[in-house]
Image (cartoon, rainbow, N blue to C red):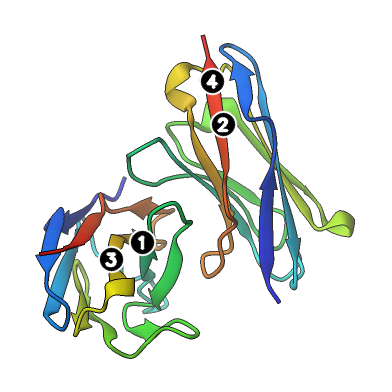
Amino acid sequence: QVQLKESGPVLVQASETLSLTCTVSGFSLTTFGVIWVRQPPGKGLEWMAIIWNNGNTDYNSTLKSRLSIDRDTSKSQVFLKMNSLQTDDTAIYYCTREDYWGQGVMVTVSS
Amino acid sequence: DVVLTQTPSTLSATIGQSVSISCRSSQSLLDSARNTYLYWYLQRPGQSPQLLIYLVSNLGSGVPNRFSGSGSGTDFTLKISGVEAEDLGVYHCMQATHAWTFGGGTKLELK
């Protein structure tokens, strides 16, 4: 069945770079795009980036300068990197196919 | 950027009551191919969002038919015909016609 699972550090220092991995199963990354979405504690959802099935990428304009999304189709993995972290980047980070979502990974940015 | 405005922000209901949530877009979500990429999700406490409705009115896999979606252009509605206890949580609308944006969420609670 379709599954997505996020992995990455739970604690990151301010000004550092966050690296997250989304490992998918039950579908191919060459058939479906994968989106990263984040949710600060107690707040709403924010789209961050997408890597399309053809490998093209798009970014939220407000975060674009800090983000990089990539993939390894042989490992069924999508990668997200975000630099210059600040405390307000503390959030649950999800990867999603729009119809299926991962469980999310809670990342805390410490000053 | 497209802004989605959800109302109400909080909804109190009794079991069995029918309720509706509105999602209004700052611009039309109809694309050049005449598709409207408007989705509805339910996020139960401590869980990731789960798909309820896609493309305005299509029921997600395994979603009970007490959920229904309607609307066009800039105005969309999610209706629950007979709230059940498992429906409590936060409802999010999302558009994917112009990149991706989410509404602010509607919390459904028991009266």
Q: What chain letter is assigned to the residue under label 3? A: B
Q: What chain letter is assigned to the residue under label 1? A: B
Nearer the camera: disc 4 or disc 1: 4
- Left or right? Give the position of B10 relative to A35: left
Number of marks in picture? 4
Reading the image, the residue beneath label 2 is A107
Q: Earlier in the sequence, mark 3 or mark 1?
A: 3
Residues marked 3 and 4, same chain: no
> How much space separates mark 4 and mark 2, taking CA atoms?
7 Å
Residue B88 circle label: 3
Observer able to see residue B69? yes
Residues marked 4 and 1, same chain: no
Residues marked 2 and 1, same chain: no
Residues marked 4 and 2, same chain: yes
Nearer the camera: disc 3 or disc 1: 3
Q: What chain letter is assigned to the residue under label 2? A: A
Whether residues under marks 3 and 4 lie with C-beta atoms below 8 angstroms apart, the answer is no
Reading the image, the residue beneath label 4 is A109
